[in-house]
Amino acid sequence: YMQLSNDLKEAVTEPVEIFKASTFCGKTQDEDDHYITDGPFMYRTKNGKLMMIWSTFTNSGYTQAVAYSDNGEIDGNWIHSEPLFDKDGGHGMIFDDLNGKKYLILHAPNDTYKERPVLIEIKEEIVCAKATSRLCVKSDALKLISKQGIAPYTYENEQKEIETAAVYRSV
């Protein structure tokens, strides 16, 4: 991160590194593999904690990782948590719908021309022992995704996939 001028036109501080993707424990591939910190999205929990969801590669594919600041601000020490989604999708954002339900939207699978937007209902839980918040995918939402949302790509579905992608692009 870096501080910007009041008119947002220029940086007024040098960039500050928050963390490196190599510090996330979800990656156990070959040491020659590269690590990325991609598509960060900041989220303030109900109890004021600052969390960041971000994308990286893990053994299970493209993953929506989670980290939180120990002091609730961007300059805190960032602690990694369990991934929010590890079914080959990323670049997520979190929002509440008009009825107050919380969703994660991301693209999946992480495969050009096959990826599409996926909505997953999530919930925010307060972990009493640490008085911290965490985000988790609702179990019924994950079942729905595994049955319908992220089907393996097959040749038979190719035309349907292309038509679906065209609809999303035209909206």
Image (cartoon, rainbow, N blue to C red):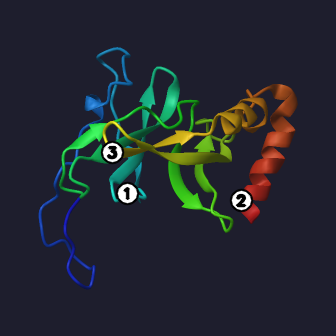
Horizontal and vertical percent for residue 86? 53, 30
Where 19 sits versus 34, above or below?
below
Q: Which mark's residue is nearer the viewer, 2 or 1?
A: 1
Where 152 sits versus 84, above or below?
above
Where 78 sits versus 50, above or below?
above
Going by the image, does 52 lie left or right of 157?
left
Given residues 93 and 108, the one toward you in this image is 93
The local secondary structure at tag 2 comes to helix
Q: Marks 2 and 1, Cα distance to the nearest angstrom? A: 37 Å
Where 4 sits versus 84, above or below?
below
Q: Amino acid at mark 1?
A: Asn
Horizontal and vertical percent for residue 2? 20, 63
| Circle nearer the N terminus (3, 2) | 3
Q: Which residue is labeled 1 in the image?
A: 47
Given residues 1 and 140, the one toward you in this image is 140
Q: Which residue is labeled 2 in the image?
A: 169
Q: Which residue is labeled 3 in the image?
A: 131
Going by the image, does 101 lie left or right of 15?
right
Q: Amino acid at mark 2?
A: Arg
Horizontal and vertical percent for residue 108? 62, 39
Q: Marks 3 and 2, Cα distance to the nearest angstrom? A: 42 Å
Q: Amino acid at mark 3?
A: Ala
Q: Determine the image quadrant of residue 23.
A: top left
Q: What residue lies at 83% left-to-right and 49% top-to-bottom?
A: 163
Going by the image, does 18 lie left or right of 39?
left
Q: Quadrant of the C terminus?
A: bottom right
The local secondary structure at tag 1 comes to loop
Q: What residue lies at 82% left-to-right and 27% top-to-bottom?
A: 155
